[in-house]
Amino acid sequence: MPSYNYTDFQAGLYDLDRFRGPLPGEKAPDGTVTTVNGDPRQLLSFDAPFMVLEMGSITCPLFQDRRKRMGHIKDRFPDVQFAVLYVREAHPGALTPGHKDVAEKQACASKLTSDGEGREVLVDGIDGALHLAFGGYPNAVFILNQAGCVLWQSAWNDPKAVALALADLTQGRAPKVRGIFKPARPWIVKKTMKGAGPGAFADFLRDFPGLIWKNLIKFNLQQRFGKGAPVGPDTRC
């Protein structure tokens, strides 16, 4: 069985039929993470009323595609904490392979900061314990409150929905908006895969039809017709 830090992307390594991370109203996982400078801290230790936490890596086209828009949302909500949990490489290649140790993972996270990422970048452990506890998806996003409760989440980051959810929460309302899956723009896919190196794009193309079916079609239909009670900003869990 492939390890958490796989060397070749395979869609079957992800349970794309069922998201297993925490849902609104449930307690968010907590644990020790490190900053890009190597300083340890607790993930859920933040002073702002809310934290927007996004899973990401430099080889994830979806994450790279959302970065600029997430930066705009951060500017729009200055009283909200925004953070990236750096996880395993979504599409490893010859230039950016799967992490073999903490130092390699830390180096990749530092590249993200050097590339202009304005949010706090927090690095998960080499075994991905926190990432897996949050569902293990490469680009999930969560909005948490001071009590460590999940107020809103999407298995795939949808910046437009994040902004609408934050607008509701900061006004004391329970957000009803649902995130949907949107493919990364082709030029960003190309740039990201080039940075990952040989092997990454071939692995991606091999599973591309299945990814379209499970994410763009099946997931979005579930979001459109699924049920789930929204929770307010003062939720306790």
Image (tube, helix red, strand yellow):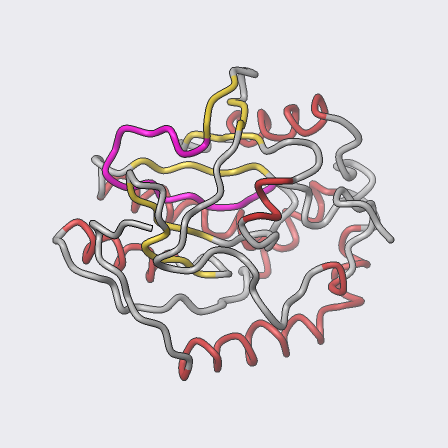
Q: Residue at x 41, y 84 (%)?
A: 225
Which residues, given as a range, are shown in magenta?
43-57
Count of numbered marks:
0
* Displayed quadrant of residue 229: bottom left
Q: Position of residue 15 (x, y in %)?
A: 67, 65
Q: Position of residue 16 (x, y in %)?
A: 64, 68
Q: Position of residue 19 (x, y in %)?
A: 56, 64
Residue placed most toward the observer, 4 or 112 = 4
Q: Residue at x 79, y 46 (%)?
A: 6
Q: Is residue 44 magenta?
A: yes
* Displayed quadrant of residue 168: bottom left
Q: Residue at x 57, y 54 (%)?
A: 135
Q: In this rendering, is residue 206 above or below 157? A: below
* Displayed quadrant of residue 5: top right
Residue placed most toward the observer, 128 or 159 = 128
| 22 sits to left or right of 165 | right
Q: In this rendering, is residue 213 above or below 24? A: below
Q: Is residue 193 magenta?
A: no
